Image (spheres, rainbow, N blue to C red):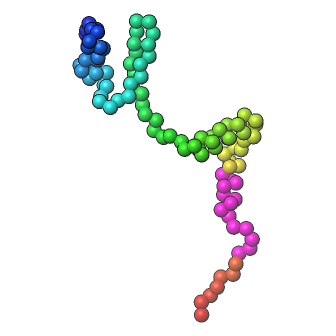
């Protein structure tokens, strides 16, 4: 399909082209421009946005990895499990009378 761009109308994408491309109302679009070429692609919204605290923890972890300070998954799970275990001896069971 060919159209003529006019000063007063601007540039628009015909509905038939939108349907063929699968572009719907509310879709986010990204425009990439090079000489005599415009590429239009849809942008998927991020599924999850980390909180500031999570981003800070990620940066801290990446810095530790860069310094060579890291823990493998087995050690991490062992450390997490250790905190759940109770230390000391078992208490005797009280019997009701």
What is the residue that sits farthest to the front in this orientation?
8
Quadrant occupied by the C terminus: bottom right
State which quadrant residue 12 falls in.
top left
Q: Where is residue 96 drawn, in percent x and y? A: 59, 89
Viewer-closest of 66 and 80: 66
Q: Where is residue 16 drawn, in percent x and y? A: 23, 19
Viewer-closest of 83 and 43: 43
Q: At x 31% / y 25%, what residue is drawn?
A: 23
Viewer-closest of 96 and 68: 68
What is the residue that sits farthest to the bottom in this orientation?
97
Viewer-closest of 70 and 62: 62
State which quadrant residue 56 falls in.
top right
Residue 57 seen in the current view: yes
Q: Is residue 2 above or below residue 92?
A: above
Q: Is residue 53 above or below residue 89?
A: above
Q: At x 44% / y 13%, what residue is drawn?
A: 33
Tell me the magenta residue range. 77-90
Q: Is residue 95 above or below residue 91?
A: below
Q: At x 30% / y 14%, what residue is drawn?
A: 11
Q: How many marks?
A: 0
Q: At x 68% / y 41%, what residue is drawn?
A: 60
Residue 2 seen in the current view: no
Quadrant occupied by the N terminus: top left
Q: Where is residue 4 drawn, in percent x and y? A: 26, 7
Q: Where is residue 74 drawn, in percent x and y? A: 68, 48
State which quadrant residue 42 falls in.
top left
């Amino acid at each position: 399909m060919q159209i003529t761009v006019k000063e007063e109308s601007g540039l628009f994408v015909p509905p038939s082209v939108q349907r063929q491309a699968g572009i719907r109302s509310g879709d986010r679009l990204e425009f990439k421009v090079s000489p005599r070429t415009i590429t239009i692609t849809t942008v998927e919204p991020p599924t999850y946005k980390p909180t500031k605290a999570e981003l800070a923890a990620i940066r801290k972890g990446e810095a530790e990895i860069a310094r060579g300070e890291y823990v493998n998954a087995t050690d991490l799970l062992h450390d997490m499990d250790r905190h759940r275990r109770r230390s000391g001896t078992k208490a005797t069971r009280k019997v009701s009378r």
